[in-house]
Image (spheres, rainbow, N blue to C red):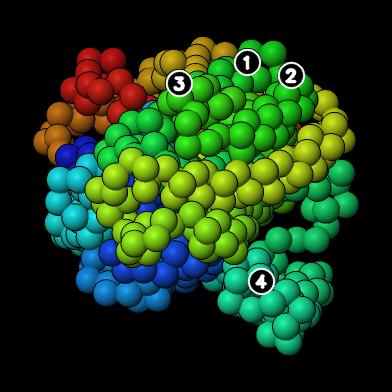
Amino acid sequence: METEAQPVGKATQNAVVVAIMLGMLLAALDQTIVATALPTIVSDLGGANHLSWVVTAYLLAETIMTALVGKFGDLYGRKRMFLISVVLFLAGSALCGMANDMLWLVGSRAIQGLGAGGLMVTATAVIADVVPLSERGKYQGFIGSVFGVSTVAGPLLGGLFVDQLSWRWAFYVNLPLGVIVLIVAAITLPSVKAAVKPAIDYLGILLIGLAATGLTLVTTWGGNEYDWLSPTIIVMTVGSLIALGLFILVELRAAEPLLPMRLFKSGVFSVCALLSFIIGFAMLGGVTFLPTYLQYVHGASATDSGLQMLPLVLGLLVASIGVGTIISKTGRYRIFPIVGTVLIAGGLYLLSLMTNHTAYLTTAGFMVVLGLGVGLCMPVPTVVVQSTVDYADLGVATSGVSFLRTMGSSFGVAVFGSFYASTLPDKLAGAIPAGVDPRAAASVEGLRQLPEAAREPITAAYADALHVVFLAAVPVAVVGFLVALLLKEVPLRDTARVAAGGNSGVGDSFAAPASFDSEHELQKLFALVVQNHKRNPGPEVLAESGIPLSIAQAWMIMRVFRGGAESGSATLQEITGDLKVPPGVFEPLAAQLVADGYLSETLGHYRFTQPGLELFQRFVGAYRVWILARLEDWDPDNAPAFSTAVDKIAEQMIDRGQSLTTGKHSALTNA
């Protein structure tokens, strides 16, 4: 396997990107596609007390996998890990569709979540392997759009499958699309792995997984399966807290910790981490249980409930995009989470007031309030963290914030579900009229077929149970408000501001934790800076540095360097092999560089002369100066790793970017 990415042709690049984005879309959709299908799934399989685990199992598995698969990709190759992730996702999807009880479905969702976590992390790494840095910002924007689209489309698609086919097709639909992803990826993906083997924090990942799963089970089982003071709950709570404490100790000593404890010495990071957890808690909790209200209480079909959820989702997206735009232009952010958490608390409280007689327009207004609140908060933690941490911590801090948001989502669903499962049986017990089969009250379809007089008290019981669910979440949002008050207003780095203002920034707000690697995160940020620049910087760099080369000659110089990295010389075939252009097209360009004394040629092999090598070094240096000018609010003097990362960015920008951003390979010969 190669130790670094190799250039691929444009057609191959496009095929890889399409396959990758389709895989990411499937993984992102399955975070929310079950929301509108859950009431029907519970009606079919029973086990309402396990309802929240259909979502939580997926999120926990996805979160834990994201911590592992990036390192595995560096060790064993990203192509291999991507293909394994697709297979896991397909296997989990097939098992979900075949489930005949709730425990089977929950276990299958965990398998699906493992695959989804792998898909999301390896996908972004593979994009970096095949797309030149100069073009990568555009594709990062596309990826951001995928997560925005999935947030809107997930509940709608789930409802459509339930009404038109079966809830099982919410999972089966992944199979044909996933097979296409698998075939295209197997054929086109380059085999790439890291040159340096990373250290994997296995023990830390195991301990945080045990702690998160244990505490989630405590919140799910407490007061439902077991009494809160039962030995089972007490032992599980103590064991989970011990695992959490051991995780902290392990992270203090790990070579490459999953979540370095030194980050929490920064008050800004601590506030952002806690705020991110609370945002995840409120968002997915609301999205998961609102369809239950809309279907059981309002009598909406699964499809209609997906459509009726749009006020929440659109409010969230509009606010998130608007906040990102304002942050990118002004650099101000503190007010947004303060106002946002107030709206989240207000939205949850308003949702708790809903009865079985609440008009849909009123419900929609309540959803808008919650959606706007979550949207105002979502972009802020990532932007602030990326502006305050040192370069060495850029990867783990960025991923740590999104890691905690996803953990918050799983806890939110579990806590919401716990209150729902403990409250509903008591509410229904006194609401089912004599002579009505209790099974009809537990089924969406059965409930719709009851006479209005019999249905009325039952829908009121569901509304009362959900009243407790939403009201219980209000204190969490209040804590979020108090945390937001502690957030300091600090100057934002230009890279973070640019990222906040684009689709990629929105996508990062919704995505699972991505790369834990600082170099990869810096390249993502810089790719957006280049995209924002809106033109090929090559001519600008040459003009500012006074280097006597045209853009085409500079590109050829870089190609000779790359092609001759091992042998010291390169043929035209080696120089242009990935461009799908006849090598002879570039012969006049090479001949001009030979005539100018920068290259020598022997039997079709081109190598640097001493003046050519010096000129090349000047060009790399000039590009480095240009890049550092766009990263001036970082601290390069105290970070050797940052300097190395900038050198790699310079080489990538000079290489394929010089020609591919113009889109006219043949024009090089006329330059």
| Residue 32 position within the rendered picture, expressed as x and y whole percent measured from the top left | 40, 47
| Location of mark 1 (residue) | 326
Identify which residue, 86 or 447, lies in the foreground: 447
The alpha-carbon separation of the residues under discs 2 and 3 comes to: 34 Å
Amino acid type of the residue tagged 2 in the rendering: Arg
Amino acid type of the residue tagged 3 in the rendering: Leu
| Residue 365 position within the rendered picture, expressed as x and y whole percent measured from the top left | 52, 22
| Location of mark 4 (residue) | 222
Question: Is label 4 or label 2 in front?
Answer: 4
Identify which residue, 190 or 592, lies in the foreground: 190
Proximity of marks 4 and 1: CB atoms separated by less than 8 Å: no
The alpha-carbon separation of the residues under discs 2 and 1 comes to: 8 Å
Tell me which residue sits at (49%, 44%) in the image: 460
Q: How crowded is mark 3: few (under 14 residues within 10 Å), some or many (20 or more)?
A: few
Proximity of marks 2 and 1: CB atoms separated by less than 8 Å: yes
Proximity of marks 4 and 2: CB atoms separated by less than 8 Å: no
Tell me which residue sits at (74%, 19%) in the image: 332
Amino acid type of the residue tagged 4 in the rendering: Gly
Comes first in the chain, label 3 or label 4: 4
Q: Is residue 338 above or below residue 271?
A: above
Question: Is label 1 or label 3 in front?
Answer: 3
Tell me which residue sits at (82%, 27%) in the image: 490
| Location of mark 3 (residue) | 361
| Residue 315 position within the rendered picture, expressed as x and y whole percent measured from the top left | 51, 24
The alpha-carbon separation of the residues under discs 1 and 3 comes to: 30 Å
Q: Is mark 4 on a helix, strand or loop?
A: loop
Tell me, yes or no, if residue 399 can be seen here.
Answer: no
